[in-house]
Amino acid sequence: MSVQIVLFDGFDPLDVIAPFEVFVAGSEYFLDNALDITLVSAEGARDVVSGSQGLRLRATAALDPHRPGIVLVPGASGPVDGDPDEGAETIPVLLARFAATGAIPLIANAMRDPDVLVTAVCGGSLALAMGGLCEGRNVVTHTLGMPLLEATGATAGSARVGDAGALVAAGGVSSGLALALSLLDRHFGPRIAHAVEELFEYEGRGTAWRAVGKAPATVPEAPTP
Amino acid sequence: MNPICGDWRLQMKTPIGTIEADYHFEEHDGVVTGTANGAGEAVALTDLVTGDTPDGQHAAWRQQITRPLRLNLEYDVSITGDTLTGESRAGRLPRTRVTGRRITA
């Protein structure tokens, strides 16, 4: 099965590498190379510059929205504060720029394909939401992105991993590990995910949120400051 | 005729910077309607209300845009002659400033 991780200008390196390492370890150590893990971009093979100190990774192919398996969309890294009108390339600016590329129609096709699971880490889901792909969906993103995510017509949740059917989204930065571990569990079972956890000396934390089962009778609310 | 009727060019601050859009308002049988044109997209305004207040003519509306990004926006503006000032808000993000001026064909 294939795992395509989508690079775009300004991506967050850890959002790419954390799940990449989890998938690679799962595949090479425990699954007899069952996964074909590639870095891709909407534009095809190219060097892609991240948002962290110009660190580059190479996309080796174009994103194929109908390749059976997983498509993973990372978030962006860059300044949180700053005025875009004065040229600040803030994270929302980078995500919106990505959301205006040909990646969005490709990912929309992938979301409609029952053989493809679209997933996102950190601001990745916010970029998809900016591109209109999260309308009415329960979606998780980095905690700083929640108000903007809600403004796009999505329903923002606070789980570390949120499974909304056609889109599985994870929260900020380190939750990319939790996302990839939960995907190994989902596709290959808990023993594979657990073996990777042992190898990485890291335990995924938090229950993946899904819109099934009973809803909590009451949800405690944070006091207003 | 409601003083908002006609064509306006508005600038509003969003999380990705200031965006500009052209608005057209018209009145039929006392009902004011409006549309916004920006980034190649035409959007009908919803929940449009207008009224006289001590600080001038007021208008508020909602709109859903998909370009340059998908956002739910709320506006609250005051009209003075050929200028318009007020606030817009995306979801529960902080309110930001809106300015506009009347444009003539």
Image (spheres, coloured by chain):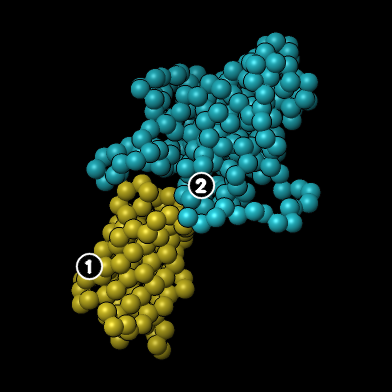
Where residue B51 sits, quadrant-wise, is bottom left
Residue A115 marker: none
Identity of the residue drawn at 25% across and 70% down: B84
Q: Helix, strand or loop at disc 1? A: strand
Q: Is residue A138 above or below residue A49?
A: below
Q: Which residue in the structure is indicated by mark 2? A: A146
Q: Is residue B101 above or below residue B68?
A: below
Where residue B38 sits, quadrant-wise, is bottom left
- Colour cyan belongs to chain: A
Identity of the residue drawn at 27% across and 68% down: B85
Which quadrant holds the N terminus of chain A?
A: top right
Residue at mark 1: chain: B
Residue type marked 1: Arg
Q: Is residue A148 above or below residue B50?
A: above
**Crowd tier of the residue under label 2, counting other residues whose Cα lies within 10 Å: few below 14, some 14–19, many 20 or above:** many
Residue B23: x %, y % from top left: 33, 67
Residue at mark 1 to residue at mark 2: CA–CA distance? 33 Å
Q: Is residue A123 left or right of residue A208?
A: left
- Colour yellow belongs to chain: B
Query: Is residue A110 visible in the rendered structure shown here?
Result: no
Residue B25: x %, y % from top left: 34, 75
Q: Which residue in the structure is indicated by mark 1? A: B101
Q: Considering depth in this image, is A196 or B19 the residue closer to the camera?
A: A196
Residue type marked 2: Met
Q: Considering depth in this image, is B89 or A225 the residue closer to the camera?
A: A225
